[in-house]
Image (cartoon, rainbow, N blue to C red):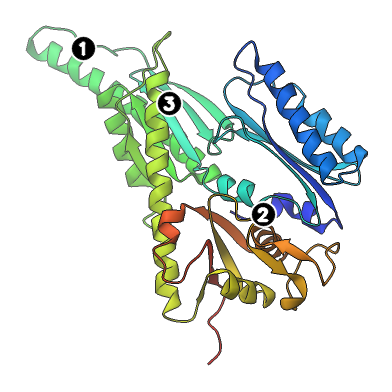
Amino acid sequence: MKLDQVRPVFDAEGPFTTVRCDVSRHTEHSAHDIQVRWESLVKELDAEGAPPGDVAAAEDRVLAETHTSGSWERTVVVCGGEVLMDDLHPARHEDVAVATHGPLPDLADWAAESSDRVPFVLAVIDREGADVSAYDGWHGEAEMRDVEGETEHLHKVPGGGWSHRRYQQTTEDTWHANASEVADEVVGLVKTHRPRAVLLAGEPGMRADVAEQVAATLPVDSTTVVHQLESGARSEGASTEALWTEVRAVLDAERVADEQRLVERVAQARAHDAAAIGIRETLRALAESRVETLLIASGRHSHEEVRVDDHPGLRLPDHPAAEDVLPGDLAVVAAACLTDASVEGVTPELLADLPGADWCAALLRWEEPA
């Protein structure tokens, strides 16, 4: 994931106040729970010396209504009383409440978790058409289209003779024509949003027809995969719980597969000196602006410290002094952002498969000169 959207955060001088808080409002006690979490965070920020203006600005965002149902988390970064970032995103964990104040924004976990949001297109299909939506991972619906095909001659009827067979053929032609309209809409969203996956739910015959047409239309080198789901229906009142459970399972499997491919790329690049493994090699590559993709393990690693003057050339916001000792995870994410590298979160178990890896690695922009 490119960090373009948070580049203005790292361009600020700091120091930064960062808050991550579960702001879910799915029970009658949710508002009270958020207030309790916030009061605990205020104590942490006061202990770390966060300015009152930063705390007040963060409070306004954390306690604000989200106007959404379900489980949500808010990440807020404030500098000099100004909110530099306010990201409301689906919660990966319950009851998250983390607050820091320091020379770097605390965005390592946010970057790792944001990178595993798998964008997808979902079509729930019946013989009359489909509801087709594009989603930016679990970050929210990006675009929705309603496809209504032809309904005349839509249902087969029992009977016999030539007229019956002609009617049956007309019905099948109508189904296929409607499937073609759905496939066209799906492909249109794929071209616009470039999703990782297309998920097709609903009437089995129709979704199979749509799947075949979409697969035939996608470019040969497309990385978009097409899945047919067993759950989901377009009929009014149909339950969506089973559908979204299956959607989540498919997307989780795609995310793990993507992570495995990425780790394999690092292992292969290592043989050509085009990869860095471990914090020391990664910091050296970042200082040389050679990192194309930074891999960081999910989870917090602030126990790993980096002394700024040990890494001349390391790009960081202006605030840290040369003698400062910084949390390693925050330093590598800041340097990656300021050198236009992308950041990908990887499960620790996968990253551990790389010999010499601790919690980070990198694919490099060019091989190291001999």
Mark 1 surroundings within 10 Å by alpha-carbon count, few (fewer than 14), some (14 through 19), many (20 or more):
some
Q: Which residue is mark 2?
A: 3
Mark 3 surroundings within 10 Å by alpha-carbon count, few (fewer than 14), some (14 through 19), many (20 or more):
few
Q: Position of residue 70 (x, y in %)?
A: 57, 22
Q: Residue at x 32, y 46 (%)?
A: 216
Identify the element where label 1 is drawn.
loop
Of badges 1 and 2, the one in the foreground is: 2
Q: Which residue is mark 1?
A: 156
Viewed as shown, does residue 131 lie left or right of 97?
Answer: left
Type of amino acid under label 3 = Trp
Using the numbered discs, state the Cα–Cα distance from disc 2 to disc 3 in whole angstroms: 28 Å
Q: Pick whichever, 94 or 121, lies toward us.
A: 94
Mark 2 surroundings within 10 Å by alpha-carbon count, few (fewer than 14), some (14 through 19), many (20 or more):
some
Q: Residue at x 10, y 14 (%)?
A: 162
Viewed as shown, does residue 159 lie left or right of 97?
Answer: left
- Residue 299 visible, this angle: yes
Q: Which residue is mark 3?
A: 244
Task: Say whether disc 2 or disc 3 marks the residue closer to the N-terminus.
Answer: 2
Type of amino acid under label 2 = Leu
Task: Say whether disc 3 or disc 1 marks the residue closer to the N-terminus.
Answer: 1
**Circle 1/circle 2 CB separation < 8 Å:** no
Viewed as shown, does residue 326 lie left or right of 170?
Answer: right
- The correct choice, above or below, for 223 with respect to 130 in the image is below
- Residue 222 visible, this angle: no
